Amino acid sequence: MLRKKNGLASNRPAGPEIARNRDPMQTRLTRRALLFAGGALAVSGCETRSRTSGFAAAGSHLGPETASHRSSEIHYAARIDQGYEIPEVDLHRLAPGLRRSVVPDPTGLKPGTIVIRLDECRLYLVGRDGQAFRYGIGIGADGYRWKGSGMIGRKEKWPTWTPTAEMLIRHPSLAIYRNGQGGGINNPLGARALYIFQRGRDTLYRVHGTPEWWSIGRAMSSGCIRMINQDVIDLYSRVPQGASIVVH
């Protein structure tokens, strides 16, 4: 169910670290998520194996496995973002390899580049010092995938979703959204959208959030790149408009 503060979504810009301005309700939600997850995650695998410069995960002063668990609990806890309640992610249903982590850069490209590897269902944001952020993604079903290089030509928070003409033909029931579905927790584009442009034109493909976080790691979208809402908020805060993107 869609929930907003005072019935309206706030237009106040959110900084990279939204958690610093957390309200009391968000704090209660996060504490609940941490208490629930604390014991159950003790046996899951570790994704961050080394300490990093500029990319250190929360709790990196702890042992690598403990730090990884603590980071995942914090990353995927419930939160309030611009008046919308984003539910926590059940880490039992999210493979360790699809959780946000810092890894050695496997791309060799310049810092700030987004690299998507469809065969891995992973997105990499290249950083400095040979490091990269890695995120799990959901990808397009066979026949709907897009590959190539481009740039992030536009960024939106809680964007409006408008089905394409092809979607309306395939799914006539979507006609009620012909003029767009407003932003919200049930919107297919989720909390953030980064619009992929090529040669100055919108490709109609996006990197975006999704309320269906359990679809991460699967090929079931109409070609766009899905991310967990908590992850796409993090990516959005790190990527400027104009950033390069490569989809393999």
Image (spheres, rainbow, N blue to C red):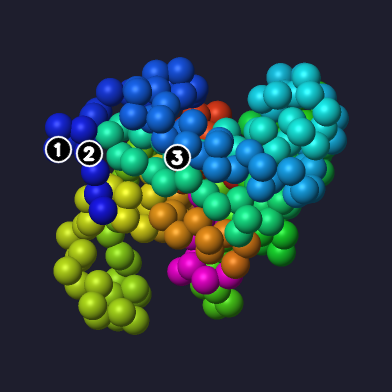
The one of 223 and 18 positioned closer to us in this rendering: 18
Marks 3 and 1, Cα distance to the nearest angstrom? 20 Å
Q: Dot 1: what SS?
A: helix
> In which quadrant of the rendered view does residue 169 lie?
bottom left
The one of 13 and 108 positioned closer to us in this rendering: 13
Residue at point 22% right, 38% down?
A: 4
Which amino acid lies under the numbered mark 2 shown in the image of this protein? Lys
The one of 167 and 147 positioned closer to us in this rendering: 167
Residue at point 79% right, 24% down?
A: 62
Which amino acid lies under the numbered mark 3 shown in the image of this protein? Ala
- Determine if residue 243 is in view: no
The one of 215 and 129 positioned closer to us in this rendering: 215
Q: Which residues are magenta?
A: 219-228
Residue that numbered label 3 is attached to = 78
Quadrant the C terminus occupies: bottom right
Residue that numbered label 2 is attached to = 4
Asked whether the beta carbons under mark 2 and mark 1 sit within 8 Å of each other, the answer is: yes
Residue at point 82% right, 32% down?
A: 64
